Image (cartoon, rainbow, N blue to C red):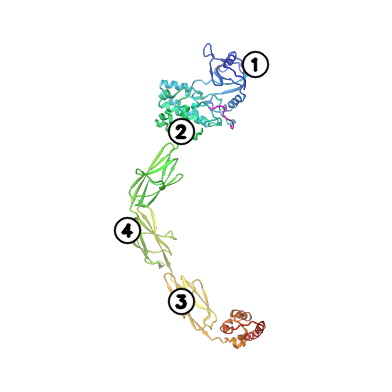
């Protein structure tokens, strides 16, 4: 930071034409005595004539030497030159432009400058004051539209001005607005920096700090000016009441406490401004200087609640629970009214945009839906027509099991329905339409299935009632029932076999009426000990049939030998727990592998009587087994012969 340079020092240098970069710039006098110049907080601007182009230039000179700030202007100049120049003033930064006789060192006498095209026209503040004076409402409206065009340009670009206000905007030809004063501009290359200035308080968010420095820093300024310009086009008298030359209408005090602001209350009267004022208030309450969707708001595109009804009318049985669904978007609050009474909160289920209402109704009525958004409300209505409630008592089938193509009579009791169908649970193609007012009808089941009635009540709601199963059966066919032996020895096995179709239950019955279930079998081994007859009882849910009987003749067994006779002394040698019939059978089978009849049938009945004494000496056991082996081989030989 160097020495302060006064405006008078610059006046002398400009008069003398002490420029390093040009010899075609001529200062212009505002009066005979004074140059055409405008002073600012840290700079002075002179109006010059450019003899090379015939136009005019603005020469901005700084009261303090600040290399960082002035280099920043060079970066800004380079970036803005690449943008559409319709709303910008072309300027160039010169680090060495004018010489002042303030120091001995030549380098210390050379100072930077910004040279830009002179924006011909009034400042926006001056033009507004003139139009208010002339009560030209049409021109004020056009000026408001021109500001909207400028705002859209700023919002679409990647830079921020930083000090949008009425005195930094020039109204040019055709009411085109141009921005001037680029000291506080943000460009992408400045990301991460802090703002060098905070703008004019009457146009800035009260929460703005130097940390707010990005392409969105102008949001609040644009919004407040947009509201002010629209308000003046509606009611020019506001200017006289609220303008203090440093603002258009709003003051920093209004932004600090908007609800207490007389201007805010007065602007609320105008419907055209209410949505914009809502956005302004939300921004101030949030403490965030950035306003999402600002471009939409400036173009009068505000989110409006939308209600989409699944149906505009419903039918319901009296006091029957009715479920009503609809969708709602962009809402802040949703209410459903039954007359003047709002429905209870627990009757509404809200899942994002999907809303479901569950209620019971006693009479015809209209539901009014109110969706409140941030800016507007939306309404929709649903008509409810109440009918008598459906009631069901019973359903009966005349038969639960039938033969194929046999008819069944269905009878039922129900009230307050418009139609009824008979359907099958598994065979979904089966459907019988029951004549109106009929309570009994005949039908032919297609197959074994669960059959039920589907009623459509007076409200169009479907009800499934009375499910019952009907078995469709075929007649039982006994293709065969036979034995592998029709004459045998007592207790020798006989193999019975059969082939039966369409039976759910099979029972084998002998001549003594002994019964054995054999439903999932095709063969059975029996051991008759005397002449016996057998037959099959076959059943399904509809039919019963018995097979022809089989007679098995049983002869006495010539090989039935007494162990006591063949093995003398066995009762003194063999305890029951040491040799049982099963073990004996295994021994015989090992020695008689080709014997058609198992020897166990010949000797088994004599085993238990012989094995009844205890023996506990090993020598006796050894002696027994030796004797038993000898006698057993003799028995085997006799049986083979």
Distance, label 3 to label 4, CA atoms, is 49 Å
Residue labelled with disc 3: 547
Is the residue marked by circle 1 packed among few (<14), some (14-19), or many (20+) residues within 10 Å? Answer: few
Is the residue marked by circle 2 packed among few (<14), some (14-19), or many (20+) residues within 10 Å? Answer: some
Distance, label 2 to label 4, CA atoms, is 66 Å
Q: Earlier in the sequence, mark 1 or mark 2?
A: 1
Q: Earlier in the sequence, mark 4 or mark 1?
A: 1
Distance, label 4 to label 1, CA atoms, is 116 Å
- Numbered disc in front, either 2 or 4: 2
Q: Position of residue 428 (x, y in %)?
A: 43, 59
- Determine which of the numbered discs, if any, sits on residue 36 in the image: none
- Determine which of the numbered discs, if any, sits on residue 437 in the image: 4
Distance, label 1 to label 2, CA atoms, is 54 Å
Residue labelled with disc 2: 281
Residue at the spot 50% in from the left edge and 75% down from the top edge: 498
Q: Is residue 195 magenta?
A: yes
Outermost residue on the top side: it is: 32
Q: Is residue 50 above or below residue 255?
A: above
Quarter in which the C terminus is drawn: bottom right
Q: Is residue 371 above or below residue 16?
A: below
The kind of secondary structure element at disc 4 is loop
Which segment did they paint magenta?
A: 191-198
Q: Are marks 3 and 4 in contact (CB under 8 Å)?
A: no
Main SS class of the magenta portion in the image: loop
Residue labelled with disc 1: 103
Q: Earlier in the sequence, mark 2 or mark 4?
A: 2
Of residues 449 and 316, which is closer to you in this image?
A: 316
Q: Are marks 2 and 4 in contact (CB under 8 Å)?
A: no
């Amino acid at each position: 930071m160097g020495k302060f340079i006064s405006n008078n020092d610059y006046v002398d240098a400009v008069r003398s034409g002490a420029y390093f970069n040009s010899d075609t710039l001529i200062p212009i006098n505002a009066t005979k005595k004074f140059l055409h110049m405008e002073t600012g907080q840290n700079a002075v601007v002179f109006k010059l004539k450019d003899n090379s182009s015939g136009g005019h230039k603005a020469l901005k000179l700084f009261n303090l030497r600040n290399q960082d700030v002035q280099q920043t202007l060079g970066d800004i100049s380079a970036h803005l030159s690449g943008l559409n120049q319709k709303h910008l003033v072309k300027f160039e930064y010169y680090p060495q432009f004018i010489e002042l006789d303030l120091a001995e060192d030549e380098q210390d006498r050379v100072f930077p400058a910004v040279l830009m095209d002179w924006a011909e026209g009034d400042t926006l503040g001056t033009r507004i004051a003139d139009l208010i004076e002339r009560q030209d409402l049409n021109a004020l409206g056009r000026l408001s539209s021109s500001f909207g065009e400028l705002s859209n340009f700023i919002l679409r670009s990647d830079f921020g001005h930083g000090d949008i206000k009425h005195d930094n905007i020039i109204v040019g030809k055709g009411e085109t607005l141009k921005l001037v004063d680029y000291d506080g501009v943000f460009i992408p290359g400045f990301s991460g920096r802090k703002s060098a200035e905070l703008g004019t308080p009457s146009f800035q968010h009260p929460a703005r700090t130097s940390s707010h420095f990005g392409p969105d820093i102008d949001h609040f300024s644009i919004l407040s000016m947009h509201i002010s310009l629209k308000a003046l086009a509606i009611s020019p008298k506001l200017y006289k009441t609220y303008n203090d030359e440093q603002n258009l209408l709003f003051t920093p005090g209004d932004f600090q406490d908007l609800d207490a602001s007389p201007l805010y209350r007065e602007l609320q009267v105008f419907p055209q401004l209410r949505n914009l004022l809502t956005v302004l208030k939300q921004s101030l309450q949030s403490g965030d200087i950035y306003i999402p969707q600002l471009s939409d708001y400036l173009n009068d595109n505000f989110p409006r609640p939308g209600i989409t009804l699944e149906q505009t009318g419903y039918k319901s049985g009296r006091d029957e629970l009715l479920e009503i669904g609809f969708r709602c978007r962009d809402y802040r609050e949703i209410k459903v009214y039954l007359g003047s009474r709002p429905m209870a909160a627990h009757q509404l289920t809200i899942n994002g945009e999907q809303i479901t209402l569950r209620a019971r109704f006693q009479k015809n009525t209209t539901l009014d839906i109110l969706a409140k958004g941030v800016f507007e409300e939306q309404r929709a209505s649903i008509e409810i027509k109440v009918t008598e409630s459906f009631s069901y008592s019973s359903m009966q089938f005349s038969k639960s099991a039938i033969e194929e193509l046999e008819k069944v009579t269905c009878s039922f009791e129900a009230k307050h329905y418009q139609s009824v169908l008979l359907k099958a649970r598994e065979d979904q193609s089966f459907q019988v339409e029951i004549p109106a007012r009929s309570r009994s009808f005949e039908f032919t089941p297609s197959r074994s299935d669960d059959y039920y009635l589907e009623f459509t009540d007076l409200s169009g709601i479907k009800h499934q009632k009375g499910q019952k199963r009907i078995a469709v059966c075929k007649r039982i066919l006994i293709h065969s029932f036979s034995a592998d032996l029709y004459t045998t020895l007592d207790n020798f096995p006989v193999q019975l076999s059969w082939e039966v179709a369409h039976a759910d239950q099979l029972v084998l019955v002998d001549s003594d009426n002994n019964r054995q279930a054999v439903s999932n079998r095709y063969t059975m081994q029996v051991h008759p000990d005397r002449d016996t007859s057998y037959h099959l009882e076959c059943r399904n849910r509809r039919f019963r049939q018995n097979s022809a009987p089989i007679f098995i003749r049983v002869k006495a067994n010539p090989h039935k030998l007494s162990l006591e006779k063949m093995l003398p002394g066995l009762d003194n040698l063999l305890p029951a727990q040491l040799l049982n019939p099963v073990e004996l059978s295994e021994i015989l089978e090992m020695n008689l592998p080709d014997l058609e009849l198992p020897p166990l049938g010949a000797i088994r009945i004599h085993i238990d009587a012989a094995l009844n004494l205890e023996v506990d000496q090993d020598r006796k056991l050894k002696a027994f087994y030796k004797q038993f082996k000898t006698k057993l081989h003799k028995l085997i030989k006799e049986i083979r012969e």
